[in-house]
Amino acid sequence: MMAEIALDSQIGHSVTAPRRIVYAVIQHRGFILVCFVAAFIIRLYWIHLMDAQPVSDSRWYYERGVDFAAGRGYSVSANAYWPENLPPAALVPE
């Protein structure tokens, strides 16, 4: 009875039974931990469901990492986006 009175005085008005249950659950000391664990499990499930393929920049970085790990080194064919491996000062127009 004292907890109900204290809860009513904190909120400022009479609280219905379902709201009391919600407030009691939220105020439980393990509530935050349960929320974090649930969020972690949902993210793991999402990662398991999605077949994420790297695109654009992330694909390029992934392919360079695979080449580097395979011993092929860091190499890029020259094109408009990736000119020859020149020092930055040589790339500045005159």
Image: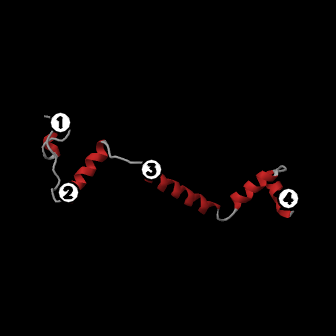
Q: CA distance from mark 1 to mark 3?
A: 37 Å
Residue occupied by mark 4: 5
Identify residue type, mark 2: Phe
Which residue is pictured at 76% across the width and 56% down the height? 21
Identify residue type, mark 1: Ala
Q: CA distance from mark 4 to mark 1?
A: 73 Å
Q: Secondary structure at mark 2?
A: helix
Q: Earlier in the sequence, mark 3 or mark 4?
A: 4
Q: Secondary structure at mark 4?
A: helix
Q: Earlier in the sequence, mark 3 or mark 2?
A: 3
Q: Name the one closer to the observer, 45 or 12.
A: 45
Q: Earlier in the sequence, mark 2 or mark 4?
A: 4
Q: Position of residue 76 (x, y in %)?
A: 16, 46
Do labels 2 and 4 touch, CB within 8 Å?
no
Q: Earlier in the sequence, mark 1 or mark 2?
A: 2
The disc placed on residue 49 is 3
Q: Earlier in the sequence, mark 4 or mark 1?
A: 4
Q: Name the one closer to the observer, 81 or 48.
A: 48
The disc placed on residue 68 is 2
Residue occupied by mark 1: 80
What's the colour scheme? secondary structure
**Residue lying furthest right:** 1
Q: Name the one closer to the observer, 83 or 77.
A: 77
How many marks can you see?
4
Identify residue type, mark 4: Ile
Q: Secondary structure at mark 3?
A: helix
